[in-house]
Amino acid sequence: MPFQSAQSEEIILFSAATLQNAIDEINVSFENAHPGTKIVASYNSASNLSRQIVEGAPAHLFISANERWMNYLAENDEIDPESRAYIVKNELAVITHKDNPDVEIDFNSKSFWENALKNTRLAISDPDHVPGGMYVKESFTNLGIWDVVERKVAASPTIRAALVLVERKESDLGIVYLSDVVISDKVKILAKMPEGVHAPIDFPIALVGKNPSEMAKTYYHYLLSDESKAVFKKHGFSTP
């Protein structure tokens, strides 16, 4: 069996929340191949997780949803720079509850967004700190309409929390990662964010610390393997 080892230990992964379903599935396969080894995964916004690492929280690997928070760890000398790589890519999608009527999204129109958000708020993750929301803010800023949208934002601590607002019909519209739509049977896609209005949504991974264990390195390589790539693709991500 590939990646098999007699070594047993606990590996701690800090990962952007949107990867949870895919990584949970990958972890089952990895643990089955390495009896006695336990992957302890903590899922949250990349901003929160990176700050926890700098403050001393134990972690062996970190996956961010953007470059900013991986750079933050690098600047604080918290990661092995040679291990830094891209693990998956993603896109943004405008969603609504599946019971709501379809709406043609006009990304460039201030009047469209004023009317669309007249009686509701746009569910996104925190646009100042959480990568998903930061990509949304960047997109609407480049489109010249962030001043309109910003007033009607319902900011959530994670992008998964923004998805839940739409699932519960607490917001009529939301913008989440394309991969988040895959996990929900309560929402539908109205449109994808136009190309070129935000930086590429690349998720970097790195080993934390300067002396990672052999098992941590084995797990790192497994996350980047073709087997794991197939799982990520099934969950709506694309891979480098």
Image: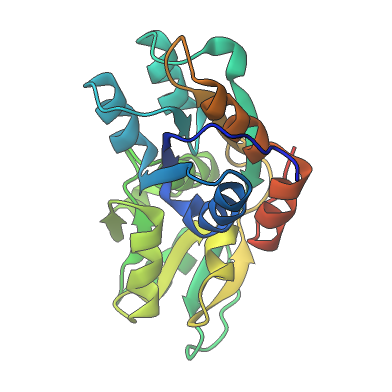
Is 26 placed above or below 202 here? below
Closest to the observer, 128 or 59: 59
Q: Residue 211 location, x and y as percent?
A: 47, 11
Report whether 227 appears left or right of 236.
right
When asked about the image quadrant of residue 124, the answer is bottom left
Report whether 212 appears left or right of 46.
right
Q: Residue at 42% across / 71% down in the picture? A: 173
When asked about the image quadrant of residue 167, the answer is bottom left
Closest to the observer, 167 or 100: 167
Closest to the observer, 43 or 185: 43
Specify the quadrant that holds the C terminus: top right
Q: Residue at 21% across / 21% down in the picture? A: 55
Is 126 placed above or below 176 here? above
Q: Residue at 32% across / 35% down in the picture? A: 49
Give the image's coloring scheme.
rainbow
Is 38 placed above or below 94 here? above
Q: Residue 108 location, x and y as percent?
A: 57, 55
The reply to whether residue 163 is visible in this rendering is yes
Q: Residue 176 location, x and y as percent?
A: 48, 59
Report whether 11 appears left or right of 35.
left
Report whether 93 appears left or right of 11.
right
Q: Residue 197 location, x and y as percent?
A: 60, 42
Q: How many marks do you count on the picture?
A: 0
The reply to whether residue 109 is visible in this rendering is no
Q: Residue at 53% across / 70% down in the picture? A: 183
Closest to the observer, 235 or 107: 235
Residue at the extreme front? 6
Specify the quadrant that holds the N terminus: top right
